Amino acid sequence: SSITDNAVGNFTHNFTNSFSNILYSHVGSATANFGSSSAIWTYMRIDGASTDTTTGSIKCASSYVNATNNRTDLDFAFVDLLCFGDLA
């Protein structure tokens, strides 16, 4: 498996063993230190073009929002992704 860094806050996770279909489940998390500022951050699947989720890869985005910034893409210090489904 591997991870491709497409842009700031945009990654493609490539699987060694493909899933049997694109209906696999996933959960992601990201961690960052925003000091004394409160923020909400997310790491989730990009739901756009049909190529963003395939049996062999999933494209994800990491971003945050706080009191002074709208949605802002960010390369977080720590990112986790778990995927569950039937393998091909």
Image: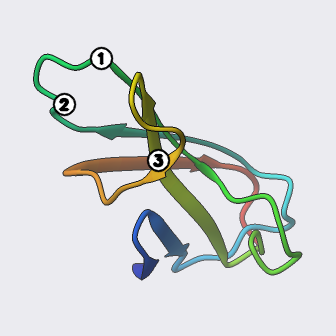
The residue identified by callout 2 is: 34
What is the x, y in percent for residue 48? 83, 66
Say above or below: 41 vs 11.
Answer: above
Q: Is residue 45 left or right of residue 79?
A: right
Looking at the rendered image, the quarter that the N terminus falls into is: bottom left
Image height of 70 relative to 68, above or below = below
The CA span between labels 1 and 2 is 7 Å
Mark earlier in primary sequence (3, 1): 1
Residue, far front = 68
- For label 1, the SS is loop
Three-letter residue code for mark 1: Ser
In the displayed structure image, the side of residue 35 where residue 21 appears, left or right: right
Is 31 displayed left or right of 36 in the figure? Answer: right
Which type of secondary structure does the marked residue at label 3 adopt? strand
Which residue is denoted by mark 3 in the rendering?
63
Residue 38, numbered circle: 1
Distance of label 3 from label 1 (alpha carbons):
14 Å
Neighbourhood count class around disc 1 (C-alpha, 10 Å): few under 14, some 14–19, many 20 upward = few
Identified by mark 2, the residue type is Phe
Q: Residue furthest left?
A: 35
Q: Residue at (36%, 56%) from the top-left corner? A: 74
